[in-house]
Amino acid sequence: MKIGIDGRAAKWYRGTGIGTYTHELIRGLNSTDCSNDYLIFMPQCDSLSNLKDNFKIQPVESISSNNFWDNVKVPNILNDANIELYHVPQNGVGLSDNISCKKVITLHDIIPLRMPETVSDRYLRIFNNELPKILDNCDGIITVSQFSKDDISREFNFPLKNIYVTPLAAEDIYKPLSKCQSKALITKKYGIEEDFILYVGGFSPRKNILGLIEAYSKLSNKLKETFKLVITGRKGPSYYKYKSRAEELSVSKNVIFTDFVPLEDMPLFYNATEVLVYPSFYEGFGLPPVEAMACGTPVIASNTTSLPEVCYESALLIDPYDIDLLAYDIERVLSNSLLKLTMVKKSLTRSNEFSWNKTAINTINAYKSIISS
């Protein structure tokens, strides 16, 4: 097969779910596939510079905007008539009409349609105005969970047989490390000296950070004195709402907002924490729980959308709207060393079922099916 891939998100959107997916998919394809030929449209990316001979990079220049979605909306024009299939990983944005080969997009989820109040106006316009045309122009959809497959098919009446599920995985950097050393490095770099509960992810309202802060406020005074709540992620407009709520609940001195954490430091946080809490209202997949599990970290996650499928029986699953239950389960994990040890073992076992090589192999099989259809 001769495959073209829009790889721009691997460089321009690194550190997000879509950027990580694109980067790790290319790495996984490079690791597993020696027989098919790939043409990757991508700017210079040092972490993907040592690809095999069956991979060719077509350089792409950035335009003036600093916004990722503005950049990728300029479609790649494919002039190579030998390409049999073209893959656009960022929800199809940037898919050109001016190509005659088969076309596939990765549609990670349809959050803008399910929870429009939680995304930017620009992103919502893309979904409302462009996605129907994109779907009319593609021959297949790759998505990241069975939940998303069913959700997409219902919303757009897209045939289930033309939607392919390729679950994601944690990157190789996520693995068990010394808890003591990880905590020491976090203390040195971030000034966090206490034990802590961890949240990883964006600041979107759908992530339910307000609910997490409220649940934390319901912990016993002894636990709040012992364990801080650490919330990672770039501080956006919602930060002030979360900070204000922590102050209203009299826990602001115990809630730490780290702001952006570089990728190389994330394994330290996962290994240093007592538990990852991920009470999101809606996920197409949910990478942080898988990353945490790969580090052997206990996970509490929502029992909604894709998260039960991803976490299966390895996490405590809670109703994200039930703040009392969330507080109860956090307290259980912090107070019960036997439960915590059991969860560590389950996390490691579950994480081993995901790998980017599996994602790549599933993707290659999807390519074959779409080309032959």
Image (tube, rainbow, N blue to C red):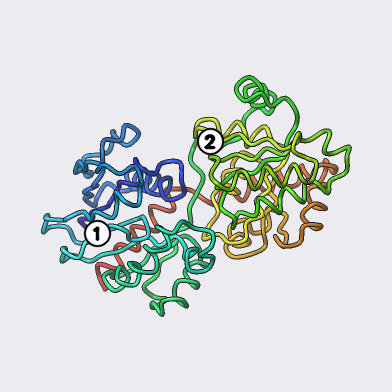
Earlier in the chain: of badge 2 and badge 1, it is: 1
Identify which residue is drawn at 56% across, 40% down. 233
Spatial CA distance of label 2 from label 1 is 33 Å
Which amino acid type corresponds to the residue marked 2 in the rendered image? Phe
Q: Nearer the viewer, residue 368 or 138?
A: 138
Seen from the viewer's position, the closer of residues 325 and 260 is 260
Q: Which mark is residue 86?
A: 1
Quarter of image, res 129 = bottom left
In the image shown, does 234 or 296 lie closer to the viewer? 234
Residue 195 horizontal side relative to residue 163, left or right:
right
User: Can residue 313 be seen at all in this image of the molecule?
Assistant: yes
Asked which quadrant contains residue 62, the reply is top left
The quarter of the picture where the N terminus appears is bottom left
Label 2 sits on residue: 260
Measuring from the top left, give residue 252's x and y in whole percent.
74, 38
Instruction: Give the residue displayed 52% in from the left and 60% down from the top.
Output: 284
User: Whole-percent x and y of residue 347?
Assistant: 65, 47
Q: Position of residue 112 (x, y in %)?
A: 47, 64
Q: Secondary structure at mark 2?
A: loop
The amino acid type of the residue labelled 1 equals Tyr
Neighbour tally class for label 1: few under 14, some 14-19, many 20 plus, Cα within 10 Å: many
Name the residue: 77% across, 46% down: 248
CB of mark 2 within 8 Å of CB of mark 1?
no
Q: Is residue 93 above or below residue 60?
A: below
